[in-house]
Image (cartoon, rainbow, N blue to C red):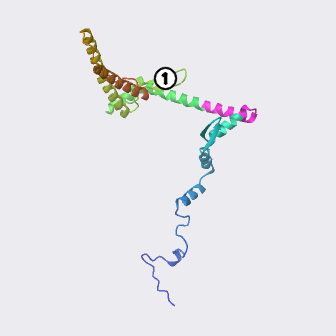
Amino acid sequence: MTDDYKVGYCRPPKASQFKKGQSGNLPGSSRKARERKRRQNRSLGDLVLENSENLLRVRDGNRTSSISTKEALLKKQTAMGLNGNRLALKASLDRIDKAEQAKRAEVLDLYKEALDYKDNYPALAESHRNRGLPPPLPHPDDVHLNRSTGEVIITGPRGPEELAQLKKILEARKIFMKKLDEHRLDAEESARQGCPYSPGDFKIISLIEKHLRSFDYELERRGWLPRVAGEKES
């Protein structure tokens, strides 16, 4: 008997065809199957880090809270050290010492970076001007360095978008402050003439003060001073 099967479009060779009853997707097509295969290919380090973030329910007196596995292990080791386990105590102290050293190094690097930025700002600003670019941000007047602690505090915008937001807040704040001064002067003048302000007029003053407090709160929330540093320079 001759085989008249011809290979062509939609007619692959029989040797490469799937066998009857056999899936064409050997690993499986379900989400669980794909997740299982992905986890099988994970490295030990990845699995350790992933499991260290799992949440555990712990009880502290009458309170129950959720903390990560690594935090629970740290608490357990610390408790063992405080209870007299020398190995746990040494491990806890070493870990704290390394963490403090790393934090000091991080703070020092940030301090040096901020100091270099302030020192090199004039040249950087001139380079921006020569290229037709706006002044770099943050402005050095907004970069405050604490030599005792190494802390760096920035009290102004760090980019064009934040600068636009700051100017918008300050402009609105200026308008409301002007309105408040006008109403207060009017109230004082009315009182001198024996025509005190009505409750409705004082309500307007109270509303203006409320808006001003919201502007000040927004500045405080962002850590900004109520001015644009270097505005006259540009």
65 lies left or right of 205: right
Front-most of 153 and 16?
A: 153
Please give the name of the residue rendered at 51% of the width and 29% of the height, measured from the top-left corner. 110
- Count of numbered circles in the view: 1
Question: Where residue 179 appears, x then y in whole percent?
Answer: 28, 21
Please give the name of the residue rendered at 47% of the width and 27% of the height, measured from the top-left corner. 114
Regarding residue 234, the answer to whether it shows in the image is: no
Please give the name of the residue rendered at 62% of the width and 38% of the height, measured from the top-left corner. 71
Per the rendered image, the range of residues in magenta is: 80-101
Tell me the element at label 1: strand
Three-letter residue code for mark 1: Leu
Q: Is residue 98 magenta?
A: yes
Regarding residue 116, the answer to whether it shows in the image is: yes
Badge 1 crowding class, 10 Å Cα cut-off, few under 14, some 14 to 19, many 20 or more, is some
Which residue in the structure is indicated by mark 1?
145
1 relative to 19, above or below: below
132 relative to 4, above or below: above
94 lies left or right of 226: right
Specify the quadrant that holds the C terminus: top left
